[in-house]
Image (cartoon, rainbow, N blue to C red):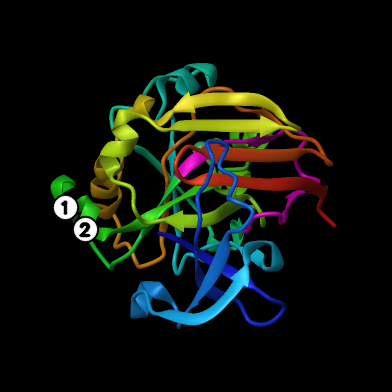
């Protein structure tokens, strides 16, 4: 099931997107959004009779994390190598404030403090239940579903600051979407799902989740051994190799096989 947040010009609501998604992550033209009553993370999936053509609604970030976005660094060996670093012995964690989150089609705002703004296409895990100290074998129980993230990073500030808060914490630095796919299993990512990033239509990242060093259950267990996770919190699972700069006016699309495609453009921060 694909859970979205959408607007028809009024208050944001949740819905279910019907129809097939092709291998590029694009939904069928006749896809429909069936409205849900309330927030499915809190009241479950309660389908209403109201429906809209997907093309008639604006999709929003499918979740606004209640408390945090947890990032994982260097979780693909080839990306660790291109960053000039070793593969970490344990998952390397950082936080992005929930104010970084924007939705499909929203602008990534290029701040004046950086001159090296990078895309990082990533699988994002959406937590469904309050949890702490989750054993690896029970991780599936606390996962609501999966979406796509762009872990936007000011690479020059990441290097000069020596830590990640500013480099990854500007408003708009965490596009999420286009929806949350609830029907995948963590094993699907171990088996391998393509993660691709397109910059102005050209493939710049062409990875597979099979290359993740720490898999999804291991990440949920590790993060929850440190901090309580709340419904709607998001874990970014790291990016494959091929990170690189974006410029004002660029369009960046990230697709993950079986989930969909997330597209944003870069604009100057006012
Ligand atoms: Mg990242």
| Figure check: 222 above or below 212 | below
User: Could you tell me residue 160's position as x and y percent?
Assistant: 63, 33
The C terminus lies in which quarter of the figure?
bottom right
For the residue pair 1 and 193, the one nearer the viewer reads as: 1
Instruction: Identify the residue at horizontal 37%, vertical 24% (top origin).
Output: 211
Q: On the image, which quarter does residue 167 sit in?
A: top right
Q: Identify the residue position indicated by label 1 in the image.
A: 138
Q: Quadrant of residue 248?
A: top right
Q: In the image, is residue 180 part of the stretch drawn in magenta?
A: no
Q: Residues within 10 Å of mark 2 (few under 14, many from 20)?
A: few
Residue 113 left/right relative to 126: right
Q: Quadrant of the N terminus?
A: bottom left
Q: Is residue 157 above or below residue 83?
A: below
At 30% from the left and 50% from the top, the residue drawn is 223
Residues in magenta, as a range: 103-123
Q: Residue at x 34, y 36 (%)?
A: 189
**Any part of residue 142 in sight:** yes
Which residue matches tag 2?
141
Judge from the rendering whether residue 249 lies leftward or rightward of residue 33; answer left or right.
Answer: right
- Checking the image for residue 221, the label placed there is none
User: Percent x, y for residue 89?
Assistant: 28, 27
**Picture coordinates of residue 109, whole percent (x, y):** 75, 51
Please state if 153 lies on the left or on the right of 88 as rendered.
right
Labels 2 & 1 near each other (Cβ < 8 A): yes
Q: Secondary structure at mark 1?
A: helix
């Amino acid at each position: 099931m694909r859970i979205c947040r959408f607007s028809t010009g009024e208050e944001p609501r949740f819905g279910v997107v019907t129809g097939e998604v092709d291998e590029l992550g694009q939904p069928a033209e006749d896809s429909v959004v069936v409205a849900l009553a309330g927030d499915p993370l809190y009241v479950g999936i309660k389908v209403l009779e109201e429906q809209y053509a997907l093309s008639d609604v604006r999709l929003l970030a499918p979740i606004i994390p209640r408390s945090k976005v947890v990032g994982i660094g260097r979780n693909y060996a080839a990306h660790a190598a291109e960053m000039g670093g070793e593969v970490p012995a344990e998952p390397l964690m950082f936080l992005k404030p929930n104010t970084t989150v924007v939705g499909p089609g929203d602008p990534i705002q290029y701040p004046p403090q950086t001159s090296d703004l990078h895309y990082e296409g990533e699988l994002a895990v959406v937590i469904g239940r309050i949890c702490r100290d989750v054993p690896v074998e029970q991780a599936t129980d606390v996962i609501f579903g999966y979406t796509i993230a762009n872990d936007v990073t000011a690479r020059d500030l990441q290097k000069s600051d020596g830590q990640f808060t500013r480099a990854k914490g500007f408003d708009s630095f965490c596009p999420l979407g286009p929806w949350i796919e609830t029907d995948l299993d963590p094993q699907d990512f171990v088996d391998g799902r393509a993660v691709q990033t397109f910059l102005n239509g050209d493939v710049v990242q062409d990875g597979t989740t099979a290359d993740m060093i720490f898999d999804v259950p291991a990440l949920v267990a590790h993060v929850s051994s440190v901090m309580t996770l709340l419904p709607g919190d998001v874990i970014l699972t790291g990016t494959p190799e091929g990170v690189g700069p974006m410029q004002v006016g660029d369009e960046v699309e990230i697709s993950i096989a079986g989930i969909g495609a997330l597209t944003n453009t870069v604009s100057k921060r006012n």
